[in-house]
Amino acid sequence: MNRADILNKVASIINERRNKAFASASANHEAARKDKTFCQLDDQARALTVAVAYDKACGKDVSEREKQLKQCESERQKRLKTLHLDLSPQFFCPLCQDTGKTQNGDACECVKQLYRELLHGSVTLGRLPSFTFADDRSATFAGNVNLKSAYAAMKRFAENFPNSDKSVLIFSGSVGTGKSCLMAATAHALIERGFTVAYCTAFDWNNMLIKYHTAPIEEKADIIDPLLSSDMLMIDDLGTEPVFNKVTLEYLYDIVSSRVSAGKAMMITTNLNSEELMHRYGERTYSRLTNKQYSAFKSIDGEDLRHM
């Protein structure tokens, strides 16, 4: 889902919650009116409410009728309690009463939380690891010299996103140096701030390109949209996927070019060094990925953290 889809989904869920609360209250009222005593009190309260309103409009003294109405409503509530029924809508969020808005017109926290949840669920193509910046232990790995600074840099990047002079970030390093965890932490931080993230492993990436290549023309747009429209596209372990003729290289170049032209961010991790990237994906793709005007290529050195 893109941002518009998510916002529409949020609005639909909020509306559904509110309708459910009123429907439940209405069902309880129907059940209560099956009780003869409650039904009489309910009808009496309605009649007194109309009479008070009419007398007020006519400028008459309504103190006695209001007293009767208050007494009737008190007895009515007692009867409801006996019946174990509540006619008040039980809103999912008491603060905004499932309108999605606070009294001053701002988005309620329940809407913001729902939006974040849907964002997490909308991460496309692959399953995003649960690792976050709170899980960062890079300072304890003395042998991995660049990892601590990489975490600090990406945390600042996520906090300031999309305001950065670099929109393409590439982290290169051997297996197990923490690149994938760094990517996951960045993704979660961006999602928490309300940005859309398309995350995938290189394997998932390749499968998506093959699916796009072989799909009927009417289905292609839905397949490619997350790769083009998401605020951040993340490809983990680029270089581990098989290269398919007229798929892997061509579509990588097209998608990178489209995102660069649109000023949209990309983050890539790879086991390949700069020279290996150029040899594998070609000079024009390499040039697009590593243009110093908008790209940063960083190496993460050190031991395999999985064995530490």
Image: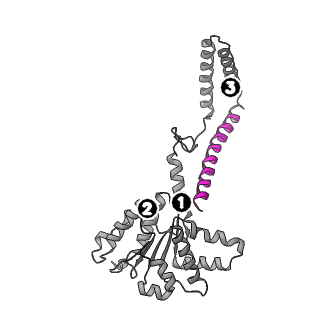
Q: Main secondary structure of the magenta part?
A: helix
Whole-Å distance between the Cαs marked 2 and 3? 60 Å
- Label 2 or label 3, whichever lies nearer to me, is 2
- Residue 229 colored in magenta in the image: no
Q: Identify the residue under disc 3.
A: 42
Could you tell me the amino acid type at mark 2? Asn
Which badge, 1 or 3, is on the more N-terminal residue?
3
- Quick check: can you spot residue 60? yes
- Label 1 or label 3, whichever lies nearer to me, is 1
Q: Identify the residue under disc 2.
A: 163
Seen in the image, is 30 located left or right of residue 193? right
Numbered disc 2: secondary structure: loop
Quadrant location of residue 304?
Answer: bottom left
Q: Identify the residue under disc 1.
A: 119
Could you tell me the amino acid type at mark 1? Leu
Q: Give the vertical position of 88 relative to 296 (above or below).
A: above
- Label 1 or label 2, whichever lies nearer to me, is 2
Within 10 Å of disc 3 (Cα), the crowding (few <14, some 14-19, many 20+) is many
Magenta residue span: 1-30
Residue in the image at 70% along x and 30% along y: 35
Are the residues at dot 2 and dot 3 in contact (C-beta closer than 8 Å)? Answer: no
